Amino acid sequence: MKRRHLLATAALGLGLAFGGAAAAQDKTKACFVYVGPIGDLGWSYQHHQGLLAVQEAYGDKVETAYQESVPEGADAERVLTQMALSGCDIIFTTSFGYMDATNAVAKKFPNVKFEHATGFKREAPNVSIYNARFYEGRAIQGHIAGKMTKTNKIGYIGSFPIPEVIMGINAYYLHAKKVNPAVELTVVWAMTWFDPAKEADAAKAMIEQGVDVIASHTDSTAPLAEAAKTGGKVIGFGQASDMAEYKPSPRVTSIIDNWAPYYVKRVGQVMDGTWESIDSWEGIASGEVELGEITDAVPADVKAEAEAMRDAIAAGTYHPFTGPINKQDGSVWLAEGATAPDGDLLGMGFYVEGITGDIPK
């Protein structure tokens, strides 16, 4: 399943967007490929903040380049090839669906470093993979949702049914259910990562069904915009970036993907010759996943509980997937006190018990 699919096409002949004049030979060139526009205020926007952090950290020692709205598949492979030929020393490919293209091009350019976000394949020694433990933030959002819903109906807009999204849905539901046994979850699959119209339609459908708390794993602010039309009856969460324009409500908090430290570190390792192929999966503890400001729209006691959960996750004293947890069919997944192995999470293809409906194939 593709990680981030966008219908917009990227014309390779138009070239790359560069962060300055032509660089001297001794500059390190860091390049980025985005699946959406950097103005999405979500996923691609937040990766671009990482590029800007690289520029700020290294100044005239680095040259940056990026291409936005690059579809997955053959187009991605052409863009990556062009970047490698243009002198990029390290290329960050920021979408699950770029996985095969990343590995294919990496084999052709062994002297270029490739970093693939959210994937699992490292088929060449010059490929690394990196991800974030978004499910940690989803657990906190679920706690808030379970406490704040008045209708006992909460919603989740899914993009594509890949493990990253499914584990977020499960973490959100489990923690809402833990504090509110009467809660019911509605999942709408938008089958897109960035399509404001589809995302808005999904939110509208939920609101019409009585859902009054909406989380989303898509890239635009459209779900929050729909929630805002309800006059305070529906709340939601920022996704990937803070989406602060919707504070204090409907956006009551957010999951912020903070890629900047990773990008700065990895570019620096290319510069000093210490870069090596790794598999990175960081979360709240390292600051890669941040919980945005919890606004005063959230009751003080709920805010305190949410922040306590954040701190416990950061300290390693609490894991959002701690048993007993059953799968949707009632079979045991995690026994009492057991925590989910990373392998189970990274391959997650099932709902937990209590969620109705099927995962699309």
Image (cartoon, rainbow, N blue to C red):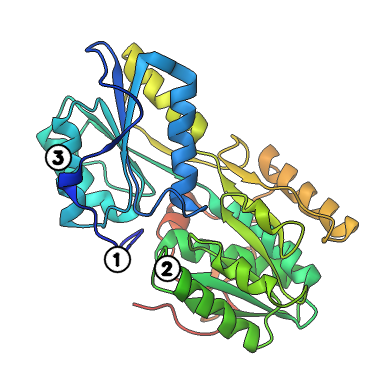
Horizontal placement of 316 versus 131: left or right?
right
State how far apart marks 1 and 2 are (Cα): 9 Å
Q: Nearer the viewer, mark 3 or mark 1?
A: 1
The local secondary structure at tag 3 comes to helix
Viewer-proximal residue among 165 and 250? 250
CB-based contact (under 8 Å), mark 1 and mark 2: yes
Horizontal placement of 240 versus 44: left or right?
right
The local secondary structure at tag 2 comes to loop
Say whether disc 3 or disc 1 marks the residue closer to the N-terminus. 1
State how far apart marks 3 and 1 are (Cα): 21 Å
Viewer-proximal residue among 326 and 201? 201
Say whether disc 1 or disc 2 marks the residue closer to the N-terminus. 1
Q: Position of residue 149 (x, y in %)?
A: 77, 75
Please name the residue shown 69% across and 70% down the image: 228
- Residue pointed to by mark 1: 7
- Residue pointed to by mark 3: 81
Horizontal placement of 289 versus 66: left or right?
right
